[in-house]
Amino acid sequence: MDSQSSHGAAASVRPGPEAVGRVMVVSGAHATVELNERTTPGESPTVGKFMELRTANCTIIGLITEVGEQAPAAGSAGGRPTYRKVARIDLIGEIRAAPGGAETFQRATRCCSAKTSCG
């Protein structure tokens, strides 16, 4: 996962928060995000907060609807199961660069990338 990512070449690069996780699964209008263990105090993802999912072409905006822990499918460390913190996101829309460089919000999402980071 990249801690910094950029928008498409046509869009200006704006500084953003450090990535707080990575997208694990996208299904329809929902995404499941594995959250990093480190978060800035007071900045942890919680239900009701907005989250941006950055792709090479656009920024997808979603609303966190669930935060929990999940046991990984593969093995465990030292015989004890290890859990990872995950968030379920309802995808609302996307921000794209419009002609002339301005960014606009559109409901629904039309862009997706295998390399997506969350901030």
Image (cartoon, helix red, strand yellow):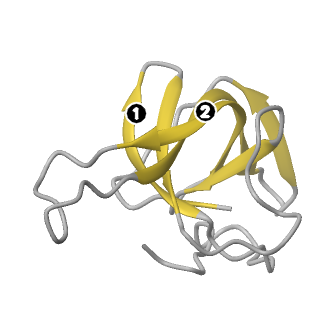
Q: Nearer the viewer, residue 27 or 99?
A: 27
Q: Amino acid at mark 2?
A: Ile
Residue 108, percent from left and from top: 65, 23
Q: Is residue 101 toward the left or the right of residue 27 in the image?
A: right
Kindly give the residue lying farthest to the front in the view shown. Answer: 79
Asked if 90 appears above or below 114 in the picture, the reply is: above
Front position among marks 2 and 1: 2
> Residue 40: x and y, percent?
78, 75
Q: Decide which of 86, 15 is in the foreground and name it.
A: 86
Residue 77 falls in image quadrant: bottom left
> On the picture, is 82 further left or further right than 102?
left
Residue 8 x, y percent position in the rendering: 58, 67
Please, what secondary structure does the residue beneath circle 2 have?
Answer: strand
User: If the image is split into quadrants, where does the C terminus sit?
Assistant: bottom right
Q: Secondary structure at mark 1?
A: strand
- Tell me the number on the disc at residue 64: none
Residue identified by numbered label 2: 89
Could you tell me the amino acid type at mark 1?
A: Val
Tell me which residue sits at (76%, 58%) in the image: 44
Residue with the mark numbered 1: 26
Q: Residues within 10 Å of mark 2 (few under 14, many from 20)?
A: many
